[in-house]
Image (cartoon, rainbow, N blue to C red):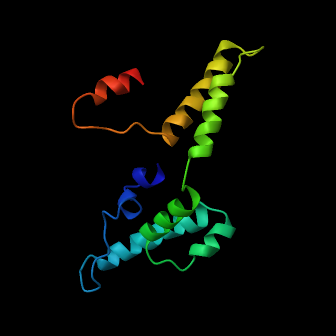
Amino acid sequence: MAFSVKNKLGFVDDNTLTKPDTTDPTYVVWNHVNNMVLSWLLLKSMHYDLAASILYAELATAVWKDLHDHLSPSNGLRIFLLERTVATLQQHNDSIATYYNALKSYWDELATCNPILSCTCGKYRTFSTHY
């Protein structure tokens, strides 16, 4: 969210803002922003044990990809645990609001771990509404 709000998502997503040539007039600005994003990643977003492994990276995109590859290779176990938690969740003495908030938070996390894929055939809207 922070990258999107600051309009810097292109530095960490799918490399939409590629590194310009050093002779390009935009290189200085690009390099400045890339270094700023790297500092956000290294200094404000991760434990120092992780930061040490990427301390000398030159591109924010490379750091983002490296972290993604190493820290989220599979959500299978988390998805299983969330599905089991949702299936066995009980209200007990909780209020309806407390029970619903817990259930909704599990559903929301499950949706981020296991996103619905889109299609071009037009059936996606029906499936998404049903889901």
Percent coordinates x, y for residue 84 in the rendering: 65, 30
The answer to which image quadrant residue 125 occupies is top left
Residue shown at 59%/62% (left/top)?
44
User: Residue pushed farthest left?
Assistant: 121
Q: Is residue 22 left or right of residue 61?
A: left
Residue shown at 41%/50% (left/top)?
5
Q: Is residue 18 left or right of residue 36?
A: left
Residue shown at 48%/39% (left/top)?
114
Residue shown at 21%/33% (left/top)?
121
Percent coordinates x, y for residue 80 in the rendering: 61, 37
Q: Nearer the viewer, residue 98 or 40?
A: 98
Q: Nearer the viewer, residue 109 or 85?
A: 85
Q: Identify whether 105 is placed above or below 14.
A: above
Percent coordinates x, y for residue 58 in the rendering: 46, 78
User: Residue pushed farthest bottom?
Assistant: 23
Q: Identify whether 23 is placed above or below 72.
A: below
User: Residue pushed farthest right?
Assistant: 93
Q: Quadrant of the C terminus?
A: top left
Q: Nearer the viewer, residue 118 or 62?
A: 118
